[in-house]
Structures are given as structure tokens and as C-alpha cells.
Image: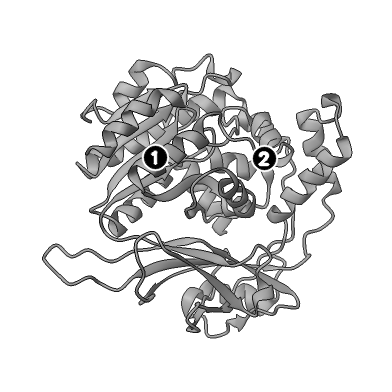
Amino acid sequence: MQAATNKFRQLMQENSPERETRSEGHFRETEARLPYFLGSRFKLPLVDNISSYLGARNPLAKQVDPRTESVWLLDNTAYRPVHPYPHKPQPFQAEFVAAYFQKNTGKDISKAVADIADKIGLKAQGGDEKEGERRIAERLQHFMDTIAPARLVTIEFPNGRKRKLGPGGRSAVSMETIVGLGEHKDGESIKIHTIPPELLPHGPMTTYFADPDGWLVISDIDDTIKRTMTPSPIGILQTTFVDEPEPIPGMPELYAEVTSSLNPNWFYLSASPYNLYPFLRKFVHEHYPLGPLILREASWMNVGGFLASLTQGTEAYKQSRMDKIHGWFPRRKVLCVGDSTQSDPEAYGDICRKYKGWIKAVFIRKVVDVAEMNNTDKNTDERFQKAFKDVDPGIWKTFVDPRELVDAVAKLKAT
């Protein structure tokens, strides 16, 4: 039911640039030919299935069992609430997100692996076909493991403080704000574990601390800092399930320069579903400044749903997450970085108009190396002028080569 609701919401939020991309790339035709049912995500015990509708107040929720279940704790950033009148600094607080899974419950995925390999022409590419199939299976597994709703987990802070998270609802994701995280300096971070720690297959979460003032960067991931080929459904499958993730040339160096000049806190905002969290987190940690990833809470049971997550309703989704970030950091100076493949210009333009003066700069990468972009107006001046209508033209800038932004970053340092 929730998956159907999310799918309908995305369809209703699809905007004109997204419709153009999906039409030009023949997304619907590709999605219809992909494996639909990958795992038994909702073959749950009856009590868990029914009680999961009760959400955070579920009296039947159970503690996670480390023998049969696992937890992902998503990195976050702690903030001090800002008052409109002079006030002493408020205690740090942060939103904690946890996802709960049953271990080793995905069914045999050999058919799905073979189907994806066939769609992208893996055999014809040459190279190590077995290694390619192994990567597909490894990355596909996170779309298949059965979720574990109605679960609680205990986390432990470095000072020994313990706190329960959960329970997760129908999507087996819990989200709650914890107040009073201790005193920390801007830019510090801490590691937070579960009890027992072996519940975490991808290691502990990191909480980053950020004061109310300073710089903040909101960066897209796909085709902004990572080659994903978003306008192409086959390109997305290739770069997500087979290829080693590849940074956009020049972007690691640009972000290193931004870090040196502005010393910002970082948010990586993507329309990818949280199934890809381990994959994307590892990529960001290897190539870019550290910061939390904000991904779509919807967890898909099919690859077609994953393609839709990246290409439908992304403007509305990103606006809602930037609204939340603004609520946390209304006084920060913000740099937004995105690309032209989907709705980053429109989403950033909307937020510029909504919170005047909050966003100090927007950099949009013009993607010119994907064939599906050729017959669209995604890179035209008219598109960008419309997206940033009534926004100071000195705020936003498009680029192809990140080296074009050296002077722009230097100017931000002086603001």
C-alpha cells in the first residue's frame, strides 16, 4: 500500500523536464521489461505486518534480534535551533534515521541478475562477465532483503549514553529527533554504535556538528559528482549495478577548493532510494568531503521503481528536504550544486525565491556527454532563465568544466 502511494505521489509530482527526459529516454518501456518483484519484502509475521500500521506508538514493537536482523543507521548533522530573538545557544539536536532488515532473506536473484546483464549488454562489453554479474548481485541484494517493521534498536553514544530508536513503520524506517547531544565544536563529529554493535553491517553512523552560522553546501550526487547517466535508463543500470562508481572529472578538486575556501558543512541530497545508501556513502567517502546523505525513504521492490525514483517527482522531493535543512540552518550561507539532467535548476530556483538571501550561489553542471540530452532543451539558456526567474543572475552559474568555477569560489570566500 505504501509503495503504491509513493509511486502515485511521484507520478503526480512529475514536472515538464522530467516528462521530457523520461520520454526521450524511453523510461517507461524499459521499466516495463525489468524484473518487477525482486524480494519477499512484505512476507512478514502477521503480528509485525498488522502492528506496523501503528507507527512510532506501536505497543507490540520488538527489539532487533542480532541473530536474524540488521540495522542501518544513517549519518546525520546536529544543529542548534535558532530563535528570532537573542537567546543563549540551544543544545545540539539531530534527526536520527534507522532502517531495519531481516538477514539473508532475499530470494534467489539469478534471474534478475541475468535480466539486468542482458538489458545492458554485459556479454557484448567484453571484460570479466562473472565479475560484472557478481557486482550486479551484490548491489541488487539491498533491493531484496525483507524489511523488518515494528522493531526497536538501542544506540550508544561515545559518552556511554544509551537511547532507543524506533519502531519503524510500514517501510521499516524510523525517524526521530534527539535533543541534547552534548557540547561540541563546529565541524566535530562522533561515531554512534548499536547495542550490540554487530547489528550494523555497514559500520557505525557519524553525527556531524554544525553551529548556526557559517557556510553550508547542498550537493546533488548523480551526474553532479558521480557519473550516473541519469537521462538513460540503460546508463543508470550500467553505472549503478555494474561499473565501479566514477567521480565527475574535476569535481573532487573543486570540492576540495570549496572546503579550503569556505570550510562548510556538507549535505549530499539525492533522489536515489535508501537501498543505495551503502553504495553511495562509500563513494562519497572515497572522493569528496564528508557529510550526511539524504536519500528517498521509499524502498523499492523492483528495478523499474528505482528508475522512477531517480526521474519522477525529484523537484518536489528536493524542495521538501531543503525546506527541512533551512529549518535547521536558517542563518547559514548556502552554496547549491547540481546538474541539468533532471530538476536541480528548478528546485534550487524555487528555494532561492522562497528563502530570499539564504542561498548565496548555485552552480549547475551542464551534462553534454549523454546522447539522450541531445534532443532536449535541458541545456538551453531559456530553460535556465525560466528556472531562475526573479533570482539575482549573479547568484547562479552554469558550467561544463569545474575549472570554470575557480573565480566564483574565490568570490564566495570574500562574502
Q: Quadrant of residue 228?
A: top right
Callout 1: SS: helix
Residue linked to disc 1: 258
**Residue 339 higher or lower than 372, as above or below:** below
N-terminal label among 1 and 2: 2
Q: Position of residue 269 (x, y in %)?
A: 46, 47
Q: Mark 2 belongs to which amino acid?
A: Thr
Q: Is residue 387 visible?
A: no
Depth check: give the residue in front, 352 or 363. Answer: 363
Q: Pointers 1 and 2 in contact (CB under 8 A)? A: no
Q: Could one spot residue 240 in this view of the protein?
A: yes
Indicate the secondary structure of the residue bearing disc 2. helix
Which residue in the protein does label 2 denote? 240
**Going by the picture, which residue comes out furthest to the left?**
85
Residue 199 percent across, percent down from the top left: 67, 73
Q: Position of residue 356 (x, y in %)?
A: 20, 42
